[in-house]
Every structure is written in structure tokens, then in C-alpha cells.
């Protein structure tokens, strides 16, 4: 991918190199004394009620303990200490509702709201260690509830507001959540959708097994809701009458902070457990050095929903621990119009924008003329998260959103890692479009071959592993330690955390993420990455978006099957796509090699995506292999699969 010298303007500007939070010395410090490095980050970035006695206890590997003996309160670190330091009038949250309603919360406001919510949860009987399920839209009450739980030491389980009653039920049962915090409904693309109804259905389906004692309901849409007087309470009636002070108690560094469920390839969702001190240290540290956050001057916007780990780490805990001013937006990028995001950037003078490649590609599809209508000159740092970003989208993002000069930090990490692991540092790294590049200081990663041996040869595809424990690492799968060991620490032996992703080095030593290993195909003995073929397809001017899967093939073991959305001008008027399909096959052969040519390319109008925007390649693989399509309940639009099937048989 990088056979030639880097383009000069992809190096940091001299001013950024001099001023950036992340400097080259961090790499040297972490290499010289890893535990000492993390101890300094923990002590300088957080306020501890009791200092820790031991940095890392790895004696029961793979179950880590970080900052052993230390005690702190996460909510105090995210809110109260900024007020105590004289920054109470700094804006913490600029909230923008989908309908255009707005709220501004300073850190002093946030402190009062969190205190009231903590008092309300206490009145409902929530104690340290009790689990609270949060099923809310992107409104300030969602963040307030998370922080109130952290204040009480009550681990929260945030469930994305687009998930079904069944998905909610399984998560409530697994965590044994005593309280559910929800809303009457949520606004989505100009309409109001019910939320509490799914909570009621989930509890009804649990019957006598339901652990839920109370449901606390935010009034958001004014929609009608069913009501159980013995169980349900309105937020505005319970929370608003509470005292606005609350004394935070310190908790052990290893006290559980949250459970976040992530889908497994088989079986029930995995409850990923994160604890307090180590997690907060690493999210604050990475938010500072990777996003180059400067709380006194920046306006920061992470577009992720709090239902996903990105929302936890880089919308709630990391930025608030750092005292950031940030934007929180309730709606989608195209509602009420396709310039909505850029309107918000212009309005609040957003300087750091962190979003997903899926969103960038959607904006590409809509056209560069849309962001061109807005003043985006405030942006100085761009970030990418969620999946590998193809070089064309990277360049579009930099050119049309970043003014041709803003550094893009393409970050790799997972729900399980808790925080950013591999990323450029904007003041240090000469950027390589499409590559996450190198582990951040304090993180150790390697790429292994099929035999589990590390290698450094360029362009060879292998397995990404982490070789040393890190502070924000998951502490296990809730209630299932054996599954934790088997899932993450068995593939290459107990000394390697296997991330589940394929990767390769380029000639400059940069790491290129190639998607999940089940998205790395073996075609006639050649290992091919679905992400790489998707990138080749999208680099063709006719293609707006692409998804590639490997399907079983008698001759080659696996064959490449592609599904593409064409740009408007490329759609043939007569509907005959044979010519463009042949052109695309030849284009992939030219970009990667004949072995990568797709066996089939299906032109579609939509791709099956979850509500968070991730393409469900598993369902496309079912289609490509002629199987009955599996569970599609987490799709944003379940009718998409029917449309694709009809197109394949029509």
C-alpha cells in the first residue's frame, strides 16, 4: 500500500508538532519503564482519594488488576473536580436535539444534575454493586444517569435505544439489573418512536424471572405509555425534587464501572466488564494525546451513540475526565437535511470531530457540495473509529471536512480493549491514508502468522495480537470467566490477547487493519482481506459503497462475493448492470491482482446495516452461500434483505 515515500503534507505542521499533547518522548518513556509510565498517567490525569500501592497485578493472568489499592470516584473525576478547580462555568455539553431544541450544561450544572440523579437512584434502593440498565436516546439524561451510577458504584449496562425488546430482555437478565432508566420515546429522522414499550415487553416476557424493581422514565416525546404505578416513575417527578448535592464515595480501582454487551459469533451476547481506575486512566490519556484535546479552547464532538463503547469512552468518560466542552447530538446526519452535521460544526465551532467511516462514506455519496455550504474552518483534528477507513474516504474526509490539512487519527480499538490502542499521533506521525499505523505509547502489539510466530514482512496477512496487559482492558465476560479465557486468550496461547482482527504491515512498518479474521478469505491458498477488496471497489468512480464476503467454493475453497451500491450517475438507465459489473471485476484485478476478482458482484440499492451503521456481512454471506438468511433483528431496516434477495432472483 505504501511503496512510495509519504506525501510531504501528511507530516505534522511544525506548530502542531511543537504544541501537541502527544510527543515522541512518550514512546521512549513507555518503552523504558511501562509500569512507571502508566503510573504517571494515572496520577497526573486522575484524582485519587487513596494512592495505589502496585501498578499492575498480573499474577492471575489473564485477569488483570491495575493500580492496586487505589481508591477514587469516577464521577468526581469527570465532574466535581473541575468545579472545585474553578471551571464550573465551563460548558460541558452543548446538546442539540433532532428537532432543533437545545440545552447547555456547564460543569456546575452537570454536577447538580448528577447529584440529583444519584439521590433519586438511592431512593429507588440502588446500592453499590447493583446493576442499572440504561435504555435512552442521545439526550443529556443518558450521560447524567451513567455518571450517577458511577458515583454510586452501581455498574451500568447501556443498551442501544434501537435494540429490540428481546435484545433488551437478554441484557437485563444477564446483568440482573434492578432498575431500568428509559424514556417514553425517541426522535428519529423526523418521527417519534416508542422506547418504554420495549421495556414493558421485555419485563413482561421475563415474567417471574424479572429482576427489575423500578423503571424510571424520561419524558422526551410526550408519547402515550402504559403505566405500572407500583414500578414506573417519571424522571421529572422523582429526580427533579431531589437535593442537588451528593457526597461521592471512593471505590476501589478495580470496582466494576460498566458492563457492555457485544455480539458473539455464536451464543448469547458477551457482557464485557470494565472497571474504574485503569479504564478511566487510559480513556483520559488517549483522548488527550490522540485527539490532541485542549479543554480550554477546543469544542469536541464524538458522534457515537452512548449505546456503543465509543460513546462510553470518548463521549462520556474520557472527555469529561479531561474537562472538555463537547457537542451531543440526538439525531442522524441526514435529518432534517444532509447538511445537519456541518450546520452543527459551524454553529458550535467544533474543532475536533470523531466519527465512523460509514458516516464519511454516506456523506461522500451525498456529495461534497453539501459540506461546502458551511464554514468548517474551526476543525483542526479529525478522527475515524469503528472499522478500517478506505484511503479514498480518508482523502475525501481530509479534503472536504478538514480543509485539506487537518490530521486524521484513524483509530483501532474494541469494546474489549476499552480505549484506543493503535493510532497516529497528530503531532508526531506522518500520516498514511487508510492505516491506523502504530500502537500508541504504552501499548504493545504484534502480527502473528498461522503458526503463532511474529513477523514483520510487508504485505503478509496475519493475526493482530496484544502482547502486554493495558489499563483499560476488559476484566472478563460478566459471569463467565471460562468464556473470557477461551474467546480471547486461547488462539495463540495465554501470553497473547487475540483481537479477532487480521492485519498486515506495509513497507514503512505501518499496521493496516483488515477486518475480522472471519472476513479474511482464503482463496486458492491466498489470504485476501474483505476490507482491502471493498477499498478497491470503492476507489472506482461508479461505486458509492461496497461490502465483500467470502463464500464457499468447490474449486478455490472460498470465492469473493461483492455487493455494491452505485453512485447515481453510474446506474444504467435500462437497469442492465452487466457492463459495469465486468468493469468492476477488472478494476479489482488491476488494483489488487487477478486472484482478488470477485466471483460475483451484485448491484444493490441498500446494504444490510445495524442501527449503528455497521454492515452485517454475516447476512450477506448467507445469501452468497445460498443459505436461509439468519437473524436480522438488529438491522436498521429488516426489509433490506428481502429487497436484495428479490434482486438476486429477479
Image (cartoon, grey):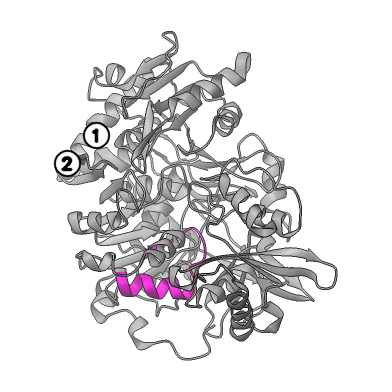
Q: Which residue is the site of mark 2?
A: 88
Q: Which residue is the site of mark 1?
A: 111
Q: Position of residue 458 (x, y in %)?
A: 61, 83
Q: Mark on residue 519?
A: none
Residue 551 found in image quarter: bottom right
Question: Residue at coordinates 35% horizontally, 68% vertically from top-left?
Answer: 367
Q: Is residue 444 or residue 603 the one in the foreground?
A: 603
10 Å crowding of disc 1: few (<14), some (14-19), many (20+): many
Q: Position of residue 606 (x, y in %)?
A: 53, 57
- Local secondary structure at mark 1: helix
Q: Position of residue 539 (x, y in %)?
A: 50, 77
- Local secondary structure at mark 2: loop
Q: Is residue 521 or residue 352 the one in the foreground?
A: 521
Q: Position of residue 113 (x, y in %)?
A: 25, 30
Q: Is residue 549 above or below residue 589?
A: above
In which quadrant of the rendered image does the C terminus lie?
A: bottom right
Magenta-highlighted residues: 383-400
Q: Is residue 389 magenta?
A: yes
Q: Residue furthest right?
A: 554
Q: Is residue 572 or residue 203 the one in the foreground?
A: 572
In which quadrant of the rendered image does the N terminus lie?
A: bottom right
10 Å crowding of disc 2: few (<14), some (14-19), many (20+): many
Q: Is residue 42 left or right of residue 576?
A: left
Q: Is residue 327 left or right of residue 62?
A: left
Question: Residue at coordinates 53% horizontally, 59% vertically from top-left?
Answer: 605
Q: Is residue 494 left or right of residue 543?
A: right
Q: Is residue 189 magenta?
A: no
Q: Are marks 2 and 1 in contact (CB under 8 Å)?
A: yes
Number of callouts = 2
Visible residue check, residue 495: no
Q: Mark 2 or mark 1, which has the lower sequence index? A: 2
Q: CA distance from mark 2 to mark 1?
A: 9 Å
Amino acid at each position: 500500500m505504501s511503496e512510495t515515500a509519504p506525501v510531504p503534507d501528511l507530516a505534522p505542521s511544525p506548530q502542531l508538532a511543537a504544541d501537541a499533547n502527544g510527543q515522541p518522548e512518550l514512546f521512549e518513556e513507555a518503552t523504558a519503564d511501562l509500569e512507571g509510565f502508566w503510573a504517571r498517567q494515572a496520577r497526573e490525569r486522575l484524582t485519587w482519594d487513596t494512592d495505589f500501592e502496585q501498578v499492575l497485578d498480573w499474577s492471575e493472568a489473564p485477569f488483570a488488576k491495575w493500580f492496586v489499592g487505589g481508591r477514587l470516584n469516577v464521577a468526581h473525576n469527570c465532574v466535581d473536580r473541575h468545579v472545585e478547580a474553578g471551571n464550573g462555568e465551563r460548558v460541558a455539553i452543548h446538546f442539540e436535539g433532532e428537532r432543533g431544541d437545545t440545552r447547555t450544561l456547564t460543569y456546575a450544572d452537570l454536577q447538580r444534575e448528577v447529584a440529583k440523579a444519584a439521590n433519586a437512584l438511592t431512593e429507588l434502593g440502588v446500592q453499590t454493586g447493583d446493576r442499572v440498565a440504561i435504555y435512552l436516546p442521545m439526550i443529556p439524561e443518558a450521560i447524567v444517569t451513567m455518571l450517577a451510577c458511577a458515583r454510586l458504584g452501581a455498574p451500568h449496562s447501556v443498551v442501544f435505544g434501537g435494540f429490540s425488546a428481546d435484545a433488551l430482555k437478554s441484557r437485563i437478565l444477564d446483568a440482573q439489573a434492578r432498575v431500568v432508566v428509559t424514556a417514553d420515546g425517541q426522535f428519529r429522522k423526523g418521527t417519534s418512536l416508542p422506547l418504554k414499550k420495549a421495556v414493558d415487553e421485555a419485563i413482561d416476557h421475563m415474567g417471574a424471572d424479572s429482576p427489575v424493581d423500578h423503571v424510571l422514565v424520561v419524558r422526551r416525546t410526550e408519547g402515550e405509555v402504559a403505566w405500572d404505578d407500583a414500578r414506573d416513575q417519571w424522571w421529572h417527578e422523582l429526580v427533579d425534587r431531589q437535593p442537588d448535592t451528593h457526597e461521592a464515595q471512593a471505590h476501589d480501582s478495580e470496582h466494576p464501572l460498566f458492563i457492555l454487551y457485544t455480539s458473539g459469533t455464536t451464543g448469547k451476547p458477551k457482557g464485557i466488564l470494565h472497571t474504574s481506575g485503569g479504564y478511566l486512566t487510559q480513556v483520559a490519556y488517549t483522548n488527550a494525546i490522540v485527539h490532541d484535546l485542549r479543554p480550554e479552547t477546543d469544542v469536541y464532538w464524538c458522534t457515537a451513540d452512548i449505546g456503543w463503547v465509543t460513546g462510553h469512552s470518548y463521549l462520556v468518560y474520557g472527555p469529561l475526565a479531561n474537562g472538555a466542552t463537547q457537542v451531543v447530538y440526538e439525531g442522524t446526519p441526514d435529518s432534517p437535511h444532509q447538511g445537519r452535521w456541518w450546520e452543527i460544526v459551524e454553529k458550535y465551532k467544533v474543532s475536533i470531530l470523531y466519527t465512523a467511516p460509514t458516516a464519511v462514506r454516506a456523506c461522500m455519496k451525498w456529495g461534497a457540495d453539501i459540506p461546502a455550504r458551511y464554514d468548517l474552518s474551526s476543525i483542526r483534528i479529525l478522527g475515524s473509529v469503528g472499522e478500517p477507513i478506505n484511503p479514498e474516504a480518508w482523502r475525501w474526509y481530509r479534503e472536504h471536512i478538514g480543509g485539506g490539512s487537518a490530521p486524521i487519527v484513524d483509530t483501532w480499538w474494541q469494546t474489549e480493549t476499552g480505549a484506543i490502542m493503535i493510532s497516529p499521533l497528530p503531532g508526531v506521525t506522518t500520516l498514511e491514508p487508510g492505516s491506523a499505523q502504530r500502537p500508541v505509547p504504552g501499548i504493545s502489539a504484534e502480527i502473528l502468522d498461522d503458526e503463532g510466530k511474529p513477523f514483520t514482512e510487508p504485505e503478509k496477512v496475519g493475526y493482530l495480537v496484544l502482547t502486554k496487559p493495558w489499563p483499560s482492558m476488559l476484566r472478563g465476560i460478566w459471569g463467565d470467566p471460562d468464556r473470557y479465557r477461551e474467546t480471547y486468550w486461547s488462539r495463540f496461547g495465554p501470553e497473547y490477547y487475540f483481537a479477532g482482527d487480521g492485519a498486515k504491515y506495509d513497507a514503512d512498518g505501518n499496521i493496516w487493519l483488515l477486518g475480522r479474521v472471519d472476513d479474511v478469505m482464503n482463496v486458492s491458498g491466498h489470504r485476501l482481506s474483505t476490507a482491502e477488496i471493498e477499498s478497491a471497489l470503492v476507489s472506482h468512480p461508479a461505486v458509492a459503497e461496497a461490502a465483500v464476503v467470502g463464500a464457499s467454493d468447490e474449486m478455490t475453497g472460498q470465492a469473493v462475493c461483492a455487493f455494491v451500491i452505485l453512485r447515481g450517475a453510474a446506474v444504467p438507465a435500462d437497469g442492465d448492470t452487466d457492463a459495469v459489473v465486468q468493469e468492476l471485476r477488472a478494476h479489482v484485478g488491476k488494483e489488487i491482482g487477478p486472484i482478488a476478482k470477485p466471483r460475483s458482484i451484485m448491484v444493490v440499492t441498500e446494504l444490510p446495516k445495524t442501527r449503528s451503521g455497521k454492515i452485517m456481512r454475516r447476512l450477506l454471506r448467507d445469501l452468497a452461500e445460498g443459505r436461509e438468511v439468519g437473524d436480522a433483528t438488529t438491522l436498521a431496516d429488516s426489509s433490506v434483505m428481502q429487497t436484495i434477495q428479490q434482486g438476486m432472483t429477479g
